[in-house]
Structure formats: C-alpha cells, structure tokens
Amino acid sequence: MLTGLPETPQELMTWDWPQFQPFAQHLADVKINSQNVEQWLRDWSLLDECVDELYNRLEVAITVNTADKDAESRFNHFMDTIYPKMMASDQGLKLKLLESGLVPAGFAIPLRNYRAEAKLFNADNLPLLAEEQKLSNEYNQIISAMTVPWQGRELTISQLEAVYQNLERDTREQAWRLAAERQLADRQAINELWQKLLALRLKLAANSGLPDYRAFRWQQLLRFDYTPADCKSFHDAIEQVAVPAASRIYDRRRQQLGLQTLRPWDLNVDPLGRSPLQPFKDVRQLEEKVSNVFHQVHPELGAYFDIMIQENLLDLDNRKNKAPGGYCTGFNLVHRPFIFANVVGTHRDVQTMLHEGGHSFHVFETAGMSYFGQLSVPAEFAEVASMAMELLASPYLANDYGGFYTKEEAARAGIEQLEQIITFWPYMAVVDAFQHWVYENPPKAKNADQCDAEWGALWQRFMPGVDWSGLEDTILTGWHKKPHIHTSPFYYVEYGLAQLAAVQVWENALRDQTSAVARYRKALSLGGTETVPRLYQTAGAKLAFDADTLKKAISLLETKIQELGSNGNNL
C-alpha cells in the first residue's frame, strides 16, 4: 500500500512532480497478478486522486479570480510540468493493466475506457492539450472582464441580466443593447483566439491518425453508445417537435405582452406584468433555502449540501474578474464537491443551484468507490444527475417547505422552468449542429465570417418566433458567447439528451416521488461502472434521439404548464 502521499489539501498544494514521480515509478515497477492487482489499483487510484484534486483546485483558483496572476502562473506550471508527465505515467500504467488481461471486480467499463484512451494517446499531443487549456483560460479572461456602466455602477454582463426582467420595456432594451455592444467590442479578440484553438485541435487529430477532430473528440469523450449520425437525428427530431412547441411559447408570450413582435429583450420579463421573482436577498439566504429544498427531496441529500456550506465548498456571488457560468467539480482526495456560480438574485440562480447540487450529489454518492477509474461518469449521465434534480426539487420551492415562494409564485416559477426546457432544445441543436459543421468543414471554419454565417443559418432553422431585425451582428456572433464551443468542444448535446431523460425521471416522480428519487440515487451510486443506456435505465429513463420520445416529453411539459397556469390564479 502506498504511503507518504499528501493527506490534506494544504499539503497537496505544495507538491510538484519530483514528489509525485517516485510513486508513479513504484507503480510502474510492480509486477501485477491476480493476488495483488486490486491493491495495486487502489494505490494507483490514490495517486490519481491526488493529482486530479491538485488540478481541480488550481483550476478553481483561476476561475474564482481570472485576474489572479499567481494562480494563473501556478496553473500554467502544472499544465507544463505535472500534467504531461502524469499523463505519460498513466498511459504506461493503463497499458500495463490491459496487457495483464486482469479484470478487477467492477472495472469492466473503466477498462473499456482505458483501451480507448490508450489508443488515443500520443506524446506529441501532451503539450498541445496543455496549450488548449491555456487558450481556454484566455477565453474566460476575455468574457469575465466584460463590464458595463449602469446607473452609476459598474456591472458585469451577468449582473445586467437582472435588468432584463424590468417591466419597463425601454429600460430592459437599453440594458440588453448595452450588453450586446460590450460583447461585440471583443469580437476581433475572440475571432483571433478561435483561429488558434481550431488550428490546435486539428493538429491533435492529425497527430492521433484520426480523420478529423470530431473523431478525436468522440474518442476523448468516451462516446461508445451513440454516433454523430444519432446527434443529427436528434437535431431533426428537435426541428420537427421542439421548434413548433417553442414557437407556441413565444407566440403566447407575445400575445400576453400585447406586442406586434417579440424582441430578444422581451424574453425574461414576466409576460403578465408582475414584478420579477425575488427568491432570496443574499447568498446566505440562497444557501439556506436550497438546503431546505434538498432536505425535502431526501434528508440525506440535504445533509450533503449542508456539508458543503459548513466546509466552504461554495463560491456563488457574481463579481468582476470571475469566470462566467457555473460548474461543480470534485475534490476526489477528500471526497468533496465544489460548486462555482454567478448568482445575481433571479429564479435562474435557484435553478442553477439545484442543477449544480445534482452534480455535487454524484460526488457524494460515489465516495465509496474502490478505484479512481470508476469515478469517470459519462457526461451524458452526469447531466441527468443535475437536470433531474431541478425537476425532483420543483415541488418544494414554496414557502411551505422552507423554499423561496408563495404558492402562486411557485406555480409561476414552475411554468418558467418547464417553458425553458422546451425552448432549450432548439438552442441546444444550434450549438451542437454548429460544432458538427465546424469540424466537418475546418477550412471554412477558420474564417470567422463563415462561422458567423453558419451560426446565423442554424439560428434561422431552429430559433423562429423572436424578431431580431436590426440585430444581425448580435445573432451572427452568438457562437462567441457559448463557452462550450471554445473551452469544451462537442460538450453540449449531453444537455439535450440528459434533459430528455430528466423529464422521464420527473414523469416517474409525478407517479411516485419516493421511488423516483430512490432510482435516481441508485443510478448516481453506480458512478462510471455501467454504460450510458444502463445508467439511464437504472434512473428510470432511456437514451433516445427520436421524435416520438421527444414528442411524449413535450406533451407532458405542455400539459403541466397548462395545469400550473390554472392552479396559480390563472398564471
């Protein structure tokens, strides 16, 4: 058994490759057999947990403050030194295990992953992968530095979003245009960064002997259960079923607002002229109420979230020089999650916390796994954990459960949530289809103007119902504002697939909430030891790309929207 590795995060943060290297060498020197392979695998897991947590903590440091040059330097040092050496070490250990023919209990799926990763490995790609991460950080720095003057204050773009709910149309239009102008100001910088990212990714694929970057990324993301053709079938299903449903939502909103045409600054305001929902006053109250909701879903889930509050595993407030978006990461040495968000006081913040809370529960539910390789949860199911939690928690948002709203406000929030699910699928199709086009047509995609044109064409295909006249540049550069395209290529269809599964889990919960939560937790506890279809099945859903499954889900959503409207004082 390995001894001497760091046991606390504080000690871990002081380590460099010379301290890790003897442990990696020891693992390489051991002759494994059926008697010692499980202990060897546990030792390897402990080393990987240390390095993985060090990476995650360094990444957290550069996202909570993108202007922290010391944090950036430490992260870059890790990527330049520890990362390539550890990747090379892991490659040797994977080959060692694969060549042994040994299959430790519960390790069949991780071994399948190792075969794919070992086949993809190329030493020439290690510095390129490190450089890709640095370029991704540059993108985050550009986005996080965007601020605008508003009523005597300097606001981030995220903070300005709260103004889009203002009942005065002129006010929200002014705020929306201000944000759009600020984002367009960095158009050239993002285009230049894009050319670097694209060239680097094409080189990654070429070095690996694969026909294109999509093939490289498919293998890197360990996608064994569906193909690019399946994604395109999903796009078609969305166009057939979700686009008309989203158009119905937009048209109903237009009529409720009494408008000739719906403009982009009309999408967040309450269509019946009510003041914006105010779910919480500050971050502390948000944490308290989210805890109450999770305790209602299941006491143990609530207890998990309370641990995160007590151990300062949340960074939620929005501020300048904080990376955009939200995420949950794992500190696997200490078996704890960490949630990062940018809350500004809206209902969307509540949904974000429920979403990231679902991810955090995955970390807690898999804490008992024997091996690090078993923690590699496929993204397609990791997003079910988060999206299903948004829906499983939805019955408890009212004050009666220690939540956020009156009964009428909870119904209003429910309608907003379900409508957003429907309108999300067409947007997801735009993002995913755009990336397929990029890596099917790299010579064209090198030209930012052609990227703009393709994004615009996809927008027309999937996003009717809103009048964007006079705002063509804002539409065309929409791909600039989607971080996944720049920092996590092809990671987006997972959200669409997982959302469809989440609705199926919710449908089960409408019949029996206790049973649905139990199945959900059981699926989470499997970690990465099953295939995607099997994980979905365990949770009470199926992996689907077809119009019929999507139509059934949308029918349920539209029915419940109507019911909530009837039950919430004719909302």
Image: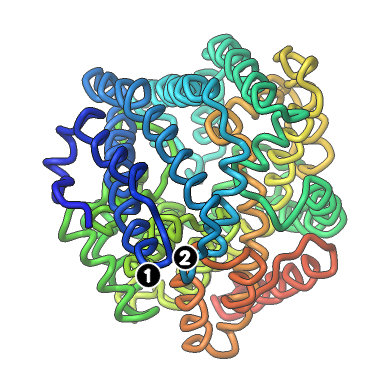
Mark 1 residue type: Glu
Q: Which mark is residue 286?
A: none
Q: Secondary structure at mark 2?
A: loop
Which quarter of the picture shows residue 156? Answer: top left
Colour scheme employed for the rendering of this structure: rainbow
Task: State whether residue 347 appears in this view.
Answer: no
Task: State whether residue 218 appears in this view.
Answer: yes
Residue 501 in the image: above or below residue 280: below
Residue 241 in the image: above or below residue 122: below
- The 10 Å Cα crowd at callout 2, few under 14, some 14 to 19, many 20 or more, is many
Pick the residue in front: 10 or 153: 10
Q: Position of residue 473 (x, y in %)?
A: 69, 19
Q: Position of residue 114 (x, y in %)?
A: 54, 49
Tell me the quarter of the image containing the C terminus.
bottom right
Query: What residue sits 80% from the left and 68% below the top?
Result: 551
Whether the residues at callouts 1 and 2 have beta carbons within 8 Å, the answer is yes
- The 10 Å Cα crowd at callout 1, few under 14, some 14 to 19, many 20 or more, is some
Pick the residue in front: 333 or 282: 333
Instruction: Point out the tag, 1 or 2, that comes first from the N-terminus.
Output: 1
Pick the residue in front: 297 or 79: 79
Which quarter of the picture shows residue 76? Answer: top left
Would you name the residue on which mark 1 appears? 365
Q: Secondary structure at mark 1?
A: helix
Query: What residue sits 48% from the left and 52% below the top?
Result: 97
Would you name the residue on which mark 2 appears? 527
Left or right: 130 as drawn, with respect to 428: left
Mark 2 residue type: Gly
